[in-house]
Image: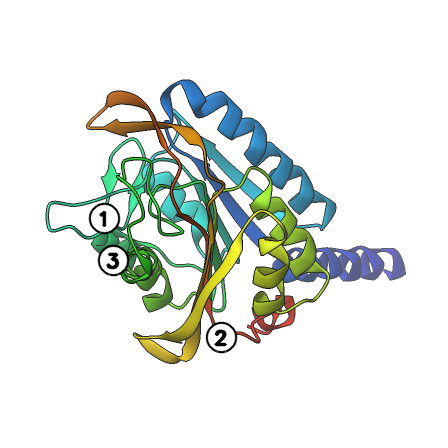
């Protein structure tokens, strides 16, 4: 009998431990000739999450069924996406480019993340402001509009934070600092480093308890921009202009402790 009770107690402990673990969903949409590199970058994030005892589910092109992602994302604390950005005929940005086009409305209607979750966009056109299809500096106002468009549906369903970074290992660096207990404002400042320049931090218009922050880069010279519009690849050599590459939306004091509090 004692042996049986010990087994039952152990099973209860295991069940509690698994329920208490953080969960993450990582998604890589089709990026044509850049898909494999994107998957490699996301596998580094996958490895990092595993080192922190986070349960991870990955969806890599071509296996990016929205139905399956919705199911796996239930109560997830981290929702990480790398893929093409989505712009719509009305000029708005938002959504995900998966095996089908997922709109902001789809996100609001279908996705059930854990309360206080954080959404992370890695190298998504418009996600931090700028897009590969832009002709020159789009200006802070438009950059803020795009970041707001992307973040709003996730925040509307209960997520507490949104972070976007277009630099190679920017999202991984962010997560390293975030798991050390730094606030998202501190993580944002650390992400800027020598690669970018602070642009603005102000109240988020849809929730005054939150802030929206943006950082830019402007290195001069020329750059090669590769974009895909309706599946058509375009490669251009253009003069370098200011790009908005890092952004966040959250209460500035949001941290890993906040994420774990619900």
Which quadrant is home to the C terminus?
bottom right
Q: Which residue is mark 2?
A: 251
Q: What is the x, y in percent for residue 60?
A: 45, 30
Q: Residues within 10 Å of mark 3 (few under 14, many from 20)?
A: few
Residue farthest along the front direction in this orientation: 221
Element under label 3?
helix
How far apart are labels 3 and 2 at the CA level? Answer: 24 Å
Determine which quarter of the picture holds residue 63: top left
Element under label 2?
loop
Observer-nearest of 221 and 150? 221
Determine which quarter of the picture holds residue 27: top left
Observer-nearest of 61 and 37? 37
Observer-nearest of 222 and 234? 222
Q: Residues within 10 Å of mark 1 (few under 14, many from 20)?
A: some
Question: Closer to the N terminus: mark 1 or mark 2?
Answer: 1
Question: Closer to the N terminus: mark 3 or mark 2?
Answer: 3
Element under label 1?
loop
Q: Which residue is mark 3?
A: 109
How far apart are labels 1 and 2 at the CA level? Answer: 25 Å
Q: What is the x, y in percent for residue 245?
A: 45, 48
Q: Is residue 225 above or below residue 51?
A: above
Q: Is residue 190 left or right of residue 237?
A: right
Q: Which residue is mark 1?
A: 103
Verify CB contact (< 8 Å) between mark 1 and mark 2. no
Question: Closer to the N terminus: mark 3 or mark 1?
Answer: 1
From the image, state whether disc 1 or disc 2 is nearer to you.
2
Q: Is residue 198 above or below residue 121?
A: below
Q: What is the x, y in percent for residue 90?
A: 11, 51
Q: Is residue 241 above or below residue 216?
A: above
Is residue 120 at all visible to an observer of this figure? no
């Amino acid at each position: 009998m004692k042996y049986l009770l010990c087994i039952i107690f152990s099973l209860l402990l295991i069940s509690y431990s698994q329920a208490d673990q953080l969960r993450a969903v990582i998604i890589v949409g089709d990026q044509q000739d850049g898909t494999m590199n994107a998957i490699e970058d996301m596998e580094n994030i996958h490895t990092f999450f595993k080192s922190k005892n986070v349960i991870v589910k990955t969806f890599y092109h071509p296996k990016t069924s929205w139905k399956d992602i919705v199911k796996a994302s239930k109560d997830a604390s981290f929702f990480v996406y790398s893929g093409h950005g989505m712009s719509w005929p009305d000029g708005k940005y938002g959504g995900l480019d998966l095996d089908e086009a997922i709109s902001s409305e789809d996100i609001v209607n279908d996705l059930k993340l854990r309360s206080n979750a954080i959404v992370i966009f890695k190298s998504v056109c418009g996600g931090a402001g700028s897009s590969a299809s832009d002709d020159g500096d789009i200006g802070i106002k438009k950059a803020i509009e795009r970041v707001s468009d992307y973040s709003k549906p996730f925040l509307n369903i209960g997520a507490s934070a949104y972070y976007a970074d277009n630099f190679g290992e920017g999202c991984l660096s962010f997560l390293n600092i975030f798991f050390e207990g730094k606030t998202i404002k501190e993580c944002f400042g650390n992400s800027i480093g020598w690669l970018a320049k602070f642009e603005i931090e102000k109240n988020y218009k849809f929730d005054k308890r939150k802030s929206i922050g943006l950082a830019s880069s402007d290195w001069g010279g020329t750059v090669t921009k590769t974009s895909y519009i309706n599946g058509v690849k375009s490669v251009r050599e253009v003069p370098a202009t200011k790009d908005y590459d890092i952004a966040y939306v959250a209460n500035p004091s949001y941290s890993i402790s906040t994420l774990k509090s619900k």
